Amino acid sequence: MKKLLVAFFLHSVSFSFAQQVSDYKYVIVPNTFVDFAKEDYQLNTYLKTLLRKKKYEIIVEGSKDIPSDLKQNLCLASKADIQNIKSSFQNKLKVVFKDCNDTILSEYEGVSKIKDFEKGYQEALNLAIVKLPLQNAKEIKKPTITKKSVETKTYIVIGEENGEIKIPIDSSKIKNNDILFESKGVTYRLIELAKDKAQLINVQNQKPILNIYPSSKEKVVHVEVFSEKGNYNTLGYVEDQNLIIEFKEGNETWTKTEFEQIKKP
């Protein structure tokens, strides 16, 4: 994460985290595939079966019955599509997986010499999904955040299943490793909590306001905002070494807030 932060905020270079399909617990499957809209050849049903065998949890596109963690963050799911590849004397297709930003994660091709369309396309689909790795998503637990003081040092205590992790945020200890921002007259500190997680903290009251996670899209990050009305997920952007976050103002109202990086002397 330190390299990520340096790349983002100190040098403004582009980046992308190479996430794999296997990093996603859920796969969204559409009701119909554009290339097979006229004749499905039971590919939709067969794809769901094959994905379940690979330990993925299937979400039907448009369904209202989805897990609570996915409701809060649709980026926990990848999206699957089956595309027809024209080929003489063969049934050939491609299964494409994308993330929530429509960035392609992986593509798998399958080819069958069976002349019958239904059996041929199904065999091609099976040969494509064979290449797909087993689902290996790491469960993301929402942190329970409290604060306490120990010998004048402030700690953020993150609740975990097997205990707690104390993250010191004593400015005298980390001032050379963190990044400072200013927004609306308030100073914030960005610190690393893990290699793929950072937190923005109000310097004055030492209160964390949001968590930042990498995305697969260039100069875009996923953000979890801490709110008295309930935490929610949004997106952040990097522009000219500054951080821009979209905050929720109402049910359908969002406001962009810029956090300007403070240059160290």
Image (cartoon, rainbow, N blue to C red):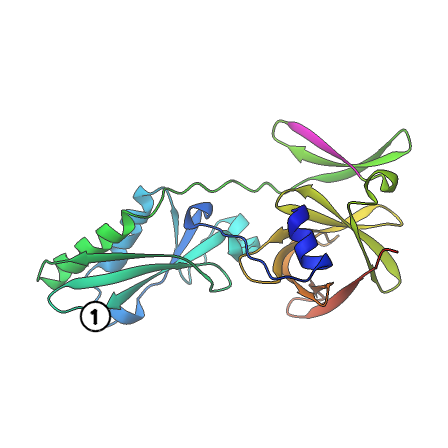
Question: Where residue 104 sits: x, y (%)?
Answer: 43, 61
* Residue 86 seen from this side: yes
Question: Where residue 248 sits: x, y (%)?
Answer: 69, 64
Q: In this view, does 131 lie to the left or right of 214?
A: left
Q: Nearer the viewer, residue 130 or 224?
A: 130
The rendered magenta stretch, by its main secondary structure, is classed as strand
Disc 1 residue type?
Lys
Residue found at x 28% / y 61%: 94
Residue found at x 8% / y 62%: 115
Magenta range is 163-168
Q: In which quarter of the image is the C terminus?
A: bottom right
Q: In this view, does 188 lie above or below 249?
A: above
Mark 1 is surrounded, within 10 Å at the Cα level, by few (under 14), some (14 to 19) or many (20 or more) other residues, namely few
Residue found at x 51% / y 40%: 138
Question: Where residue 60 sits: x, y (%)?
Answer: 38, 57
For residue 242, what is the image quadrant?
bottom right
Q: Which of 10 and 191 is in front in this view?
A: 10
Residue with the mark numbered 1: 86
For residue 172, what is the image quadrant?
top right
Q: Is residue 179 above or below residue 171?
A: below
